[in-house]
Amino acid sequence: MNNLSRRSFVSFALASTSLLAMPAISTGSARPKVVVVGGGAGGATAARYIAKDSKGAIDVTLIEASKHYYTCFYSNLYLGGFRDYDSIGHSYDNLSANHGVNVVHDWAISVDSAARKVRLGSGATVSYDRLVLSPGIDIKYDSIDGYSVEAQTKMPHAWKSGTQVKVLRDQVLSMPKGGTFAMVPPPNPYRCPPGPYERISMVAHILKERNPTAKIVVIDPKNKFSKQGLFMAGWEKHYPGMVEWIDNDTHGGIKNVNPETMEIETDLDTFKADVACVVPAQRAGAIAMNAGVTDGDWSPIVPASMQTKADGNIYVLGDASVASAMPKSGFSANSQAKVAANHIRGELTDSRVFPAKFSNTCWSLVATNDGIKVGANYKAGEEKIEVVDKFVSKTDEGNAKRKKTYEESIGWYNGITTDMFS
Amino acid sequence: MVNFVFKFFIAISCLLIFRGLLAEPLLDGADFDYGEYLSGQCLTCHQSSSDEGIPAINGAEALYIAKKLILYKNKELENEVMQLVASALDKEQIASLAIYFNSLEK
């Protein structure tokens, strides 16, 4: 048997087996293919739910460069010393072992939407019937004058978890006595709206214990922020006099940063820092841009399904999408992934499609056992995802309630990471 | 007058008892597949076995789950997240979730 005839024989045998095993699948001999790019809260959840709920009827490939995923959520708690680094790292092994997901550790370089193929860093291509892009954010390094890829070592953004957060923690721990920590939060819209302010809380927590005469200055490009009243009351209660928050109207705008002199220049003043966390503006991960499904920096979606408005075969989840009222959070991405997974299964296997239902809760830690939260339910409107109902923690609630909220956040962390990776 | 009040009281009591006996079954209209889909919202937080911070609900009695969700919906149980989740669930959705979680292994 020469090579060609051997291949033909194998193809025939595979086709026969598939037809016998799954006669109902409309694509004939091959199972429908879903490719998911990005193994975070959106992508890992989507891959797991499509594979799990289709019970093998859909061939799911997850493309993710990293072998271990370090969650962005709770990375602030690692920074503050409440979690060790390993505890926020997760592997993809169970997605393969338990649900048959093909996990490919590579970069997705480009999308040929006409041919429905994704090209990988290795040069290989992967075909899809439906493509899910959940690439998270890319940092717009040039959005702050003086900032760059090189500058991120001196002035870490630490906004994508992983080693950047380690760098920032080491810098905070070795800050000179009585030194200044400067934080430049990002402008809207950005990943994790309460994140910069939880980060300030966690840095204050470290400094209060190790370096109590140190100061924190927050040079914000915004005039208000998520859970503002709760954070500011918490800073005053736990870290009195340590945190100074300066809004955009007061400092007049951030003109530039200088990683060599560790200076941040505004219209009002030039701030000199010993450690600076500078988080620039953000946009959808590059693969969403490359796939041609973005409008400006983000990808508009159809609220009922999370399909992109540009291409019905491509779905965008999480931070990279324009989810309107839903914040860019891990919880949101996980919620959107289930809506997309249900819709994709319906399209490819004729399973039942149920109405989209979205939710989000963001927990933040202000100090030891002082947890706060904000949350909402959402529905799919015609054009936008719309808020149905919402809540936020109260400034006057007691210590017992705050402790319970923190404990609840631990349960959520364990829950969502199980929902992504088990 | 006293007699009237007494009769009225008896009538109301009978009505309440009768309603209790014929209580609308909480699991009517349950749809397993719908419950499986809706459970995705719960599983962002609820783990299958650990009760740390948030209780495990896999394998719980269906009526127990349905009653709890109704109590949260009516704001008779405290927890903002659960009140929010339950407020957006109708009777069929509550019943569907209850039978789905009951079917899962503890």
Image (tube, rainbow, N blue to C red):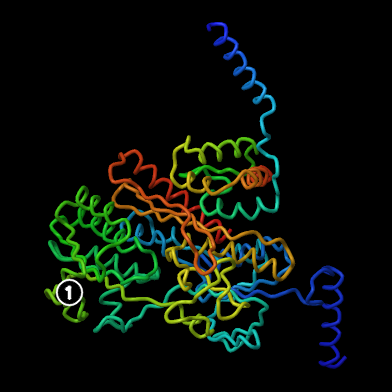
- Residue at position x 46%, y 78% from top? A285
Residue A135 percent coordinates (x, y): 49, 75
Subunit that carries the residue with mark 1: A
**Quadrant in which residue A45 is drawn:** bottom right
Residue A191 percent coordinates (x, y): 39, 68
Q: Where A335 falls versus A109 (above or below)?
A: above
Residue A299 percent coordinates (x, y): 49, 76
Mark yes or no: residue B106 visible: no
- Judge from the rendering whether residue A416 lies leftward or rightward of residue A405; answer left or right: right
Q: Where B12 falls versus A88 (above or below)?
A: above
- Judge from the rendering whether residue A277 lies leftward or rightward of residue B102; answer left or right: left
- Judge from the rendering whether residue A2 lies leftward or rightward of residue A390; answer left or right: right
**Quadrant in which residue B99 is drawn:** top right
Residue reaching furthest top? B2
Q: Where A29 falls versus B69 (above or below)?
A: below
Count of residue discs: 1
Mark yes or no: residue A367 visible: yes
**Quadrant in which residue A176 is drawn:** bottom left
Identify residue for label 1.
A252
Kind of residue at disc 1: Gly
Given residues A2 and A70, the one toward you in this image is: A70
Mark 1 Cα within 10 Å, few/some/many (few <14, many 20+)? some
Element type where label 1 sits in the image: loop
